[in-house]
Amino acid sequence: MPTFADRLASAVQQKKTPALVGLDPRLAHLPEGLRQGIDEANLGQVAEAFRMFCCGVIDAVAPLVPAVKPQAAFFERLGPPGMQVLWDVVGYARENQLQVVLDAKRNDIGSTAAGYADAYLGESSAWRCDALTVSPYLGDDSLTPFVDVAVERDAGIFVLVKTSNPGGGLFQDLVADEKPVYEHVARHVEHLAEQSVSRSGYGAVGAVVGATYAEQLSVLRAALPHSWLLVPGFGAQGGSAKDVAGGFDERGLGAIINSSRAVIFAHERPEFQEFGSARWQDAVYEAARQMIDQLRSETPAGRLG
Amino acid sequence: MPTFADRLASAVQQKKTPALVGLDPRLAHLPEGLRQGIDEANLGQVAEAFRMFCCGVIDAVAPLVPAVKPQAAFFERLGPPGMQVLWDVVGYARENQLQVVLDAKRNDIGSTAAGYADAYLGESSAWRCDALTVSPYLGDDSLTPFVDVAVERDAGIFVLVKTSNPGGGLFQDLVADEKPVYEHVARHVEHLAEQSVSRSGYGAVGAVVGATYAEQLSVLRAALPHSWLLVPGFGAQGGSAKDVAGGFDERGLGAIINSSRAVIFAHERPEFQEFGSARWQDAVYEAARQMIDQLRSETPAGRLG
């Protein structure tokens, strides 16, 4: 099997877009038809609505995008029934030939980190994801177990480096040895990534870099020549296509750009009102297309052909 | 209902020990009777063995200790059946009047962080835990949602500050503004904790500080006067009772000391061979008693009466 880095490159080239759709289901924002009659306190009912919604989003976007990013928190919120639905949704995305990046920001040390890696990474794992987001605070021996399992199973990880939230700087921007902490993290990510580079030129270790910091994105693109960048914060969080342009390499590869709310809850956006609640999947499709067009016209993703 | 900080203080005073038992089930280390006939590839079977093992550990230690700490990774490894068993184990611990600290090191931003907090914290949550471990890299607006939910639901969080693994220093020990990063994190934890102090003198926001750094533990005890410290690394990871002594206040409160493997897999330790595999729960009981005795004789926990 090709490595995750190469599968992602192929998928981006085939779909001609780096657009990544985040699956962040929230009951209050589901289309009316999926919300109707659901008792919010009945977690099994809510989970079933999430399953129908996420699979509906996948149906709409699978022809357009290379990958989806389920957000674990929203499934965990529902307890065991939610976890079952997360499993179903990952499987459905895979059946639809989408790369699945689970956004779960796991982290731990030693054999416990290996436990998380074993849980989520690769076809033979319980959750069968292609890649997983990982938090770096615990240091190098917390990242190595994830990297080892990822490499062994042709899977990938994305390490949080510079995040898109306003408070992200509190610890990430502290300056030590004349560099902000996030650059120290980036340097370690590059050290890990360069050891697993495959055909695409990228390794098994990527980085999460927020779209709200356009300048840092270019700096980190240069500092991380062997890492796919996962760029959240596009759309609803305020990042524009121009802001993310610095994340790409000259082929239009090297970055996947996530949008969640603006795509999956497109039926709530004024410009897609025409579809009405019943045709919510058409709104999702159109919102994804709009995002793809913006990325094509304002970033090197336009070179994807 | 009393706050988590006060419930923990009461439980520690009632049991006269700060010993916390980590529930880290691993198939290879389960007593023979629970491992027999289990197909490792059958995750449902393994999950059922984990349920019986963890409930058996709880039966053994519930008379002795105030709290247990299930490690989420080992349940997540088994996919949805493992998550159901985690739910069962949390419920069983609660029935046995134990405080449940879920070690899941969750972290995210804004409404996603709120999703995790909503998922895990308090009786009304899906997972019904008393407290949750949280990773700080994403900054203040990633911690506030956890704190808000914890305070609202009389639950608690433990923020990773200084961890017990050899590689923990890679980012935590970087020096910025003349202080290591972990002290910056500690300062923010104190800022959050002091706003929710209740009768015990402690707030809803605790800190994880490894037992392998005896000196830093005293420094952080002083820097975090309103935070319960969760101290892993005792026993199998090399921390001794003397090493953790600095974590307590003058009443013998303020720290809970975790041991996982040395207690739950006590049947594998040479000194408990006499019990044999069948009486593994007696070995667990004796190992917990031994740990409690060590903490009583070499730390301020001896003052608990």
Image (spheres, coloured by chain):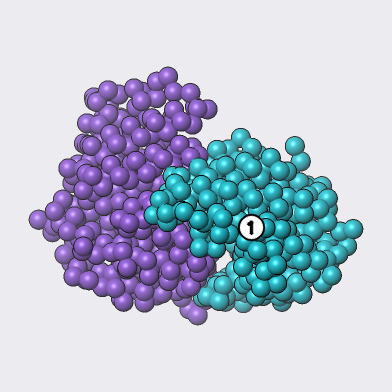
Chain colours: A cyan, B purple
Give neighbour class at mark 1: few <14, some 14-19, many 20+ (Cα, 10 Å): few
Q: Could you tell me if residue B62 is visible in this image?
A: yes
Q: Quadrant of the N terminus of chain B?
A: bottom left
- B60 vs B299, nearest the viewer: B60
Q: Residue B213, image x and y in percent?
A: 38, 59
Q: Is residue A240 above or below residue A205?
A: below
Q: Is residue B279 above or below residue B57?
A: above
Q: Amino acid at mark 1?
A: Ala
Q: Residue B146, image x and y in percent?
A: 41, 66
Residue at 22 percent across and 37 percent down: it is B60
Residue under numbered circle 1: A278
Label 1 residue SS: loop
- B63 vs B170, nearest the viewer: B63
Q: Quadrant of the C terminus of chain B?
A: bottom left
Residue at 19 percent across and 52 percent down: it is B17
Residue A214 figure quarter: bottom right
Q: Chain of mark 1?
A: A
- B94 vs B220, nearest the viewer: B94
Q: Residue B119, image x and y in percent?
A: 42, 56
Residue at 63 percent across and 54 percent down: it is A69
Looking at this view, name the residue that lies furthest to the bottom: B177
Left or right of residue A107, residue B279 in this image: left
Q: Residue A116, image x and y in percent?
A: 52, 45
Q: Is residue A65 above or below residue A152?
A: below
Looking at this view, name the residue that lies furthest to the left: B305
